[in-house]
Amino acid sequence: MTDALRPVDITEDQLDDVLRVRARSFGPLPASAREEWRKDAVEFLEDGRYVGVAAGDEVVAAARIWDFQQWWGGRQVPMAGIASVVVSPEHRGRGVGSMLMRGVLQRSIERGFPLTALYPATTVIYRKLGYEFGGGRYRFSFDTADLRSLGGKEVRIRRAGPADAGRLLELVAQAHESGRANGVLGWPEAKVAEWLGDDDMFAYLADDGFVVYNWHDQDLRVEELIALSDTTARALWSTVGSGSSTARKVHAYISPNDPVHLLAQREADKETHVQHWMLRLLDAPAAVAARGFAPGVTAEVDLEFDDPEVPAHSGRWHLSVADGSGKLTPSERTGDVLRLGSRGISALYAGTPLAALRGSGLASGGSAGDDGVLDTAFGGTPAYMLDFF
Ligand SMILES: CC(C)(COP(=O)(O)OP(=O)(O)OC[C@H]1O[C@@H](n2cnc3c(N)ncnc32)[C@H](O)[C@@H]1OP(=O)(O)O)[C@@H](O)C(=O)NCCC(=O)NCCS
């Protein structure tokens, strides 16, 4: 008889089990990387953010929960980033992954995260638990020579290092607040300083912008570029473009709405790459209260949610949006209102238009007028991330 399966918190002495399952899920980790992996793992388990499923004493499934901030409507919202989801092959297809993910959702709710997101290797298991596509990690490619000629030579830039982490974060906040960014992750200053201390990252700072880039094979890769003026955008992109004698292409993780699309003469469009991530609301009233909305937008809409995994969501709600903020409160109203399941709520929050939600069966009821109001309230700049986790 097999041992009963039960959810567990991963402990340090179970990390060999996790490594064994991980090797069977993502391929073996080179011996040189194992120490680093273990060090990272300990950070998660010491904070109660490494959960698993055990059969007897043996761990047969595990997942990590990153403690992230995510920008929505120009404000940061705490988000549980789920990563390294693994189930041992002999236990797959028997509900163990779902049991693991229910433990992940439960822990994330206990920890007060209103949102959770992940990069899915398969969508099936996550959709069943209420996740839906929220946005993408976009990588666009440019001819290096094209960027070189963008100008901005009058802008003074200097090399940046770990001591500039605070200034970089101020610039990020200014850009994302004024641009009402959606989806992109917010990092703590210590992590940014660590990143800037990496000798393989080349960071340059102007008064109102910065770029961090590196080599990727024979090409250059922009990890992040923030510019609060067009002259600084020109200066930073042409700094990267100054590598045109040795690097043919620049690959850039940026928003699909980044101004460089409007500045560069040519974009290597056949090389655009997008990796979709999924979002799920864990506490809808908190998620709505924490995010921003465009100033000038007002909404008064009744909704009905059905969310078997988070029963507190199920029922009728009233959404009010005014002066850049929103509120979701229980509603007593009867009659026909827009009905959404957990996938529908999550996709709507991420800016998916009602036409797409209705077209895929994720929304029903309500009125065309409410659809227009909700599209305006939740729509905006497409949700994107720069980082994979
Ligand atoms: C993906 C993984 C975690 C799923 O674990 P599992 O224990 O098999 O999941 P469950 O048995 O709870 O399956 C839940 C649902 O997802 C479906 N599912 C699971 N794996 C799937 C796959 N690879 N492709 C399509 N559907 C899949 C199941 O069929 C089930 O749906 P059903 O009830 O309609 O049959 C597991 O296969 C695994 O560890 N894979 C390798 C690593 C990996 O890809 N991790 C995910 C990283 S995001």
Image: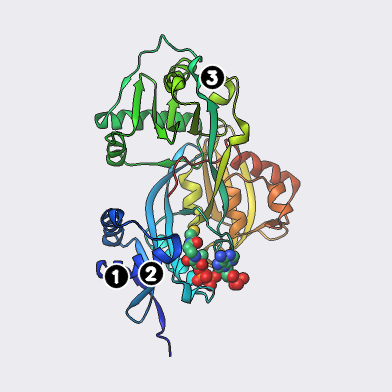
146 w.r.t. 270: above or below? above
What's the colour scheme?
A: rainbow
Secondary structure of the residue carrying numbered label 3? helix
Secondary structure of the residue carrying numbered label 1? helix
Indicate the position of residue 222 as horizontal and vertical percent values.
44, 31
Asked if disc 1 is less than 8 Å from ligand 1, the answer is no
Secondary structure of the residue carrying numbered label 2? strand
170 w.r.t. 130: above or below? above
Disc number for residue 306: none
Q: In this orientation, which residue lies closer to the viewer: 359 or 306?
A: 359
176 left or right of 205 in image = right
Q: In this orientation, which residue lies closer to the viewer: 164 or 337?
A: 164
Indicate the position of residue 191 as horizontal and vertical percent values.
30, 41
Indicate the position of residue 193 as horizontal and vertical percent values.
28, 36
Disc number for residue 52: 2
- Determine which residue is flagged by label 3: 146
In this view, the mark in front (3 or 2): 3
Identity, as a three-letter code, of the amino acid under mark 1: Gln
The answer, for residue 128, to whether it is visible in the render is: no
- Determine which residue is flagged by label 1: 14
Chain-order first, disc 3 or disc 2: 2
Q: Which residue shows up at 50% across the image and 30% down it? A: 179
Disc 2 + disc 1, Cβ < 8 Å: yes
For the residue carrying disc 1, how many other residues have a C-alpha within 10 Å: few (<14), some (14-19), or many (20+)? Answer: some
In this view, the mark in front (1 or 3): 3
Identity, as a three-letter code, of the amino acid under mark 3: Asp
Q: Which residue shows up at 57% across the image and 26% down it? A: 261
Chain-order first, disc 2 or disc 1: 1
Identity, as a three-letter code, of the amino acid under mark 2: Gly
Q: Which residue shows up at 48% across the image and 47% down it? A: 289
The answer, for residue 254, to whether it is visible in the render is: yes
